[in-house]
Image: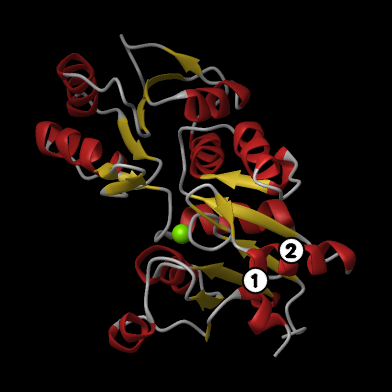
Amino acid sequence: MKQYEAFLLDLDGTIYRGSQVIPEAVRFVQALKREQIPFLYLTNNSSATPQVIAERLTAMGLPTTEKEVYTSSLATAAFLRQRLAPGTPLYIIGEAGLRTALEQADFVVDDQQPQAVVIGIDRTFSYDKLAVASRAIRQGALFVATNGDAALPTERGLAPGNGSLVAAIRVASGVEPIVIGKPNKWVVDFALQRLGTKRERTLVVGDNLHTDIEAAANSGMDSLLVLTGFSTIDDAHEHPVRPTYTASDLWSWWTK
Ligand SMILES: [Mg+2]
């Protein structure tokens, strides 16, 4: 498995479950650090900044810096900067992770004449926000979503994810969004750019066939499905998109 010189690692179900790190994943990350193999944690999470995510991982017992975390919000900012000049006004529906990423990319918040409507999960989503967003999109603003996740795992079960909010705007505006997060290639491509490693020598790792493994395929990359989270081995046999490798956990794959 040493043919890979870098890794893009999903977080939830791959590195941790609930509030607990997965010991086999921690051992794998420690091996990467020992051998100075570059990696990024790659998450569809758009609500938290890389700093907050790094602090959470550190508190779980996996020391992490913000530079090791790449979110769908960072990828969304990178995507928009390829298309829009600094200072371009945007209408943003989302939380701190998205707002911070877009501000750091020198965009300006403006709900009057936005050139793009950008949406990440927003737990204060409202009819007013839906109305402003769909009006702007009907008037020609670009419609970009950090991710299309239908649901979010929480301690009380599944909660509505960003995809649910995006669906409301899609229906209200009659326009299909550009979706940056997994399973789409954008977030993987921008993360790879940040790593600076070769596509064919970088492995995408995750626990979800529908997001992680499909994202790898859409980006033309090899993938490893770990069975520590969402997808089961039976799912893997039935899913039309196959991972390059399947393993019970990261450490057993690494030491095979
Ligand atoms: Mg996951």
Residue drawn at (88%, 69%), measured in percent from left and top? 35
Kind of residue at badge 2: Val
Using the rendered view, name the quadrant where residue 118 is placed.
top left
Q: How many marks?
A: 2
Q: Position of residue 225 (x, y in %)?
A: 49, 76
Is residue 101 found left or right of 172 in the rendered image? right
Is residue 43 found left or right of 37 in the rendered image? left
Q: Ligand 1: does it lie within 8 Å of the C-beta at label 1?
A: no
Q: Which mark is residue 234?
A: none
Q: Label 1: which residue?
A: 199
Q: Residues within 10 Å of mark 1 (few under 14, many from 20)?
A: some
Q: Position of residue 200 (x, y in %)?
A: 65, 77
Q: Nearer the viewer, residue 215 or 159?
A: 159
Residue drawn at (17%, 21%), measured in percent from left and top? 135
Q: Position of residue 131 (x, y in %)?
A: 16, 19
> Which colour style is shown?
secondary structure
Residue drawn at (53%, 47%), measured in percent from left and top? 19
Is residue 1 found left or right of 143 in the rendered image? right
Kind of residue at badge 1: Arg
Residue drawn at (56%, 39%), measured in percent from left and top? 74
Label 2 or label 1, whichever lies nearer to me, is 2
Q: Residues within 10 Å of mark 2 (few under 14, many from 20)?
A: many
Depicted 19 relative to depicted 172: above or below: below
Depicted 119 relative to depicted 16: above or below: above
Q: Nearer the viewer, residue 193 or 55?
A: 55
- Mark 2–mark 1 Cα distance, whole angstroms, equals 20 Å
Q: Position of residue 126 (x, y in %)?
A: 20, 19
Looking at marks 2 and 1 on the same chain, the residue that comes earlier in the sequence is marked by 2
Under circle 2, the secondary element is: helix
- Image quarter of the C terminus: bottom right
Under circle 1, the secondary element is: helix
Q: Label 2: which residue?
A: 29
